[in-house]
Amino acid sequence: MTKVALSGAGGNMGRILRVELQKRGVDLRSAGGRTPLEPLREGEDVMHGDLRDAAVVDRLLRGVDVLIHLAGTSVERPLPEIIENNLVGLYQVYEGARRNKVRRVVFASSNHAFGMYSVDDRLTLDSPYRPDGFYGLSKVWGEAMARMYWDKHGVEGISLRIGTAMGKPPENFRQLSTWFGTDDLVDLVMRCIETPNVGYIDAWGVSNNTRAYYKDVVNERLGYRPRQNAEEFAADVLKQPNPLDPIAQRHQGGQFVTMDFTPVEQRTPRP
Ligand code: 15L
C-alpha cells in the first residue's frame, strides 16, 4: 500500500487533507511544525518538527512513497523568513526525498507565482511566472526545484498552483476567481497520489470557476475535472463591497501585490 506523508498538517489546507485523505483510506503520516498534532484516533501516525533539520525530514519520509508538501511560510513575509522556510527548508525536504527514495513530491505552489498578471489575463500552464512578492518568488524556486529533482534525480513532481483553499465558501470578489472548493481539493490531491508515472507536471489548484484566471482548469494528465464553481455563491458575494484596494483589484495576486508596491508615479522615469 502507498504510504503518504503530509507536511504542514496543522495549517488551513493540511487540517482538511489530514481528515479527508484518511477517510478515503490513505495510509497517512501527518506532520505539524512547532506544535505537536493531537492524534485524531488511537495509533494515528503523527509527528512534528522543523523541516530544516535533516533528522526531522528523515523521520517524516522514512518508508514514504508520496509526500504532499504543504509546510512553509504561506503568506508574504520579509525575505529572510521566506528563505529559511521556503528555500532552505524545501532543499532539506528534497534531499530527504532522495535519501529516503520517495517516489513523488506534490509541492504546494501558489497563484502568487503569477500574481502580477492583470485580472483580465487568462493564463495557460506555460505562461511565464510573474510573482507578486517574496512568497510568490519562493514558489517559483519551489517549482523549479521540483522540476530539477525529477530531471536530475528521478523524484517525480507535481506543482499545484493553489488558489484560495480555506475550507469555506468564497468570501470576496477576488475569490470568485481563485476559489478552490474542498471537494475539488481532495479530488485533485487523491489524483496526485494515485495517477501513475507523471514525471513532472504543473496543475492549477482551483475549482471550475466561471471567473477563473486560467484558460483551462481541467488537468488531462491527472484526469482532474473540477465540479465546484464559485459562481454559485456570486449573488451573495456581489452584495458586499469589494474589500480590496484599487491596486489589489487590478492584479491576480490581490492584496499581496499592494504590499511594498511602488506606485507608478514614484518609479524611475524612463528616458
Ligand atoms: C496563497 O498562496 C496563500 O497561502 C493563502 O494564504 C491565500 O493568500 C491564497 O494564496 C490566496 O491567494 O487566496
Image (cartoon, grey):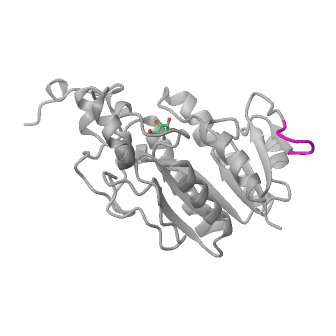
Q: What is the quadrant of the C terminus in the image? A: top left
Which secondary structure dominates the residues rendered in magenta?
loop
Whether residue 173 is visible, yes or no, is no
Residue at image location 42% in from the left, 39% down from the top: 170
Residue at the far bottom: name it.
197
Span of residues in magenta: 39-44
User: Which one is in front, 64 or 41?
Assistant: 41
Q: Is residue 26 toward the left or the right of residue 144 in the image?
A: right
Residue at image location 65% in from the left, 49% down from the top: 69
Relative image position of residue 112 (x, y in whole percent): 42, 43
Whether residue 251 is visible, yes or no, is yes
Q: Is residue 100 toward the left or the right of residue 253 in the image?
A: right
Relative image position of residue 100 (x, y in whole percent): 81, 59
Q: Is residue 267 magenta?
A: no
Relative image position of residue 171 (x, y in whole percent): 41, 34
Snapshot quadrant of residue 33: top right
Relative image position of residue 247 (x, y in whole percent): 25, 31
